[in-house]
Image (spheres, rainbow, N blue to C red):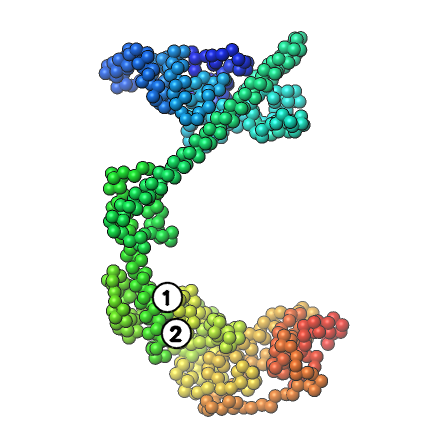
Amino acid sequence: MATLSTLVDGQGLPNSLDSQHIGFISNRLQLIIPPENAKPLQMRKPSRKALSRRGRGALKVFLDLPLDVIFEALSYLEPLDLLTLARLSKEFRALFMSRSSLSVWRRVLNQVPGLPECPRDLTEPQYASLVFEKFCMACGSNHGVINVDYRRRLRMCVTCFKNNTITGHCLISEYGQFAQNIFPLLPCSGEDIDDNMDDSDKYYIYLDSTFFKPEAELMLAALDERTDEPCDTAQLSTFMENESLNALCMITEGISIALWHAQKGLEAIIDAYDTIESRYQKIMAEIGLLGWNPAYFPEDSDEEFEEWEKYLRQPKEFSKRGWNMIRPKMEGIYLRCRRRRQIDSLFRRVTEVYFHRRVVQPDETRITMPGCADLVDDPFLEEFLDQKHAGCTDEEILAFVDDKLCNNPSGVFIQEVERGLLQQIRLLDVSEEPPFEGLEQARILFLCPCFACQDEHGKSGGLISYPEIIGHLADVYPDRRWSSLYPCIQRDVYIAAGVILETLGLEKNATKDEVNVLGKFVCVCHHHMFSGPLPFEQLVLHVYNEQQWYRDMKLHVAHNMRRVAFDYLLNSHSDHRLPELIRHTTSDDDAETHPRTPLSVPETQSTDVPEDLICSYCYQLTFRDCPIRNETGEYHMRVKHGMESRHEDDVGEPEEVHEAYRSSHRY
């Protein structure tokens, strides 16, 4: 079956002009195995237009020229151009594949800088096709990955390479150990073999190498025939020696061609880089003449950066015509980036002024003002940036901030905040509660875990009402948007606040104003952080923390301790106990409305103890270390476990409590 290799098989041109041995396989390209679905190549019938009298006349006139004139003219072509001409017509093929054209092929190949001489096993047209053409020799495809193996003189796609090559392992598997005799007789791809290597090392290298399958099969058949027939041992030895030298010569020539190809590729990369750099410098010079400011050029983060770089850094020579074509597009990119940079710069100036002006506003105004990062959604600011981005004075910025952002805000931010918070509250599954009416209710408290609240109220954070939560987060995180700080309202906080309101004699849906009329409140449990008159938010936080501790302990009680757990766990701030603990006070100056003499520390216990202590009761119930401070030990034992006094072994260092539990159980 014919393949594309027959187009360059050099029929009519001798494989070599000398008498050196080049192997018993004279034309390896005809051995290539085409794909199973490949169709025999047929010459395409020329169209009527191609066979016009004018066309035939032009070719006839050219071919009628003296051969020395034709060959002299064609000797200035590139090898690929000469191959194209050879396939133009039967007449051209006959001319360029004849012995008389050998000098033309050699001149054309010699003009390629650094190209090694034509291998002895190839004709000059075959050599030119192997080095300069890109299609697969088996299927003719030029798509996908086309691999070239100069040692075996093959150029194929991945699929055809698999069909035409075989590894040493497969040869041994199919033909037995006899196949190892042909390993040195064939060119192969793989690790280079050194003459100083042991035979075993060479053998394993050959096993991992790949061979041209049709060539290996022919060599096996030839060697088997010479081995079976009675012949002179010297003749067999000469045959193997000649084939081995031929294979070594092919490998050496292939390595030389591969090195030239790699060098050519490196030179092409260097030339392309030089072309790109030259083009870049010339375009930048043209941009400089236009007066464009480099500060406004696209950066990596800009969406136009890739397109901008594509115009700047192409492996094409700079030309005025090309510059005139890309200049309008680059100018559009430049103008968009300049406008964006100017708007960003003006926005930073506005937010800096806004930050300082916001701080000096009255509390009732400041708590509803968004942070600096949320100004991007303000319609007034958007209009101001669009109109003044090209140039704006500090006085204009100050006047705009005072007039539009501080005194007469658009209200868009507050509307969005209220809409999101209302939707969050409506998702609370509290069906027994009265219908929700608005954010002005006192029980609408948001848990804020910011570092400031944790420092003041503990790791759980603080509770803040609306709209104070807006100003609080804007003060703590001025550079972050509200959407990234979105505070949450806990269902347990919501319920606890409602119960406290009822305990104080108010409705669950009472407003903040109704609660503020009562003044501040006190809890008689005497927690060291909530001992004085407390605002309503602090009171709710205290009750929530105590109830949350009880729920957490119930959840983690060990299985073998559940029977006695509730004898030692006290829900001190449960709903039915709140009336005994909380009440309101009208004196903001009273540090302790209901003083209680604290229980004394046992005399046998030193006051100089470490702070990282744990409760032995909590550990025995849950097998967890619940850290407490020494000064809160009495409160913990009285409120959490219902103990009237604190004993020496109730609280201790973790190692001591663990050892005491292992040695003996309290219960």
x, y percentage for residue 293?
Answer: 28, 53
Q: Is residue 139 visible?
A: no
The Cα–Cα distance between marks 1 and 2, rounded to whole angstroms, is 13 Å
x and y, in percent, of residue 15 in the image: 47, 14
How many residues crowd around disc 1 within 10 Å: few (fewer than 14), some, or many (20 or more)?
some
Left or right of 360? Residue 117 is right
Q: Is residue 313 above or below residue 63?
A: below
Amino acid type at circle 1 is Ala
Q: Secondary structure under badge 2? A: helix
Q: Residue at x 26, y 41 (%)?
A: 323
Residue 394 visible in image: yes
Left or right of residue 358: residue 23? right
Who's the residue at 28% across and 46% down the image? 285
Q: Is residue 160 above or below residue 230?
A: below
Image position, residue 464 (x, y; %)? 44, 76
The C terminus, quarter of image: bottom right
Q: Which residue is mark 1?
A: 373
Establish if 108 lies above or below 372: above
Q: Label 2 crowding class (10 Å Cα cut-off): few <14, some 14-19, many 20+?
A: many
Residue, disc 2? 471
Residue at the right extreme of this rendering? 663
616 and 427: which one is in front? 616
Kind of residue sitting beneath label 2: Gly
Image coordinates for residue 552, horizontal then vertical, percent: 58, 71
**In percent of the image, x 40 and y 73: which residue is there?**
475
- State the SS at label 1: helix
Q: Closest to the observer: 599 or 424?
A: 599
